[in-house]
Amino acid sequence: MGAPDPSPYTDRMAKWTPKHEAPEPLEGPVVATITGGTILWFVLFLVQLPFYGWFDDHGHLWWVWTCLAGAGLGLIGIWYVRGRDAALKRHAAEREALDNR
């Protein structure tokens, strides 16, 4: 007894395999996007604070803390994407320096 014939599975995969190269990933204003999202989460947290009692009475207190968590995670995201952006720029400068030799 041997292994099952893989051809039915291979044929199905070939049908859905793209026949062109994947495009390069888009690089947008990542730092600005993450910063904007972080500010939005923090503003939502501040807007909800005056209604803390209402949220508590209606069982929606988690909304307030979700906004604060989003702002906190956004700060980590800002730190990360700024480091990533700096590393990409440093790598591009090193590559350009090597190409100019």
Image: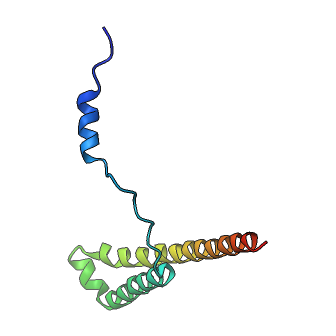
The residue closer to the viewer here, 8 or 40, is: 8
The correct choice, above or below, for 80 with respect to 55 in the image is: above
Residue 31 appears left or right of 65: right
Q: Position of residue 22 (x, y in %)?
A: 39, 59
Q: Quadrant of residue 51?
A: bottom left
Quadrant of the image for the C terminus? Answer: bottom right
The residue shown at (54%, 74%) is 81
The correct choice, above or below, for 76 with respect to 44 in the image is: above
Q: Position of residue 37 (x, y in %)?
A: 41, 82
Q: Position of residue 78 (x, y in %)?
A: 53, 77
The residue closer to the viewer here, 71 or 65, is: 71
The residue closer to the viewer here, 87 or 21, is: 21
Quadrant of the image for the N terminus? Answer: top left
The residue shown at (26%, 32%) is 9
The residue shown at (41%, 64%) is 23
Q: Position of residue 30 (x, y in %)?
A: 48, 78
Q: Quadrant of residue 26?
A: bottom left
The correct choice, above or below, for 35 with respect to 12 in the image is: below
How many marks are shown on the rendered structure? 0
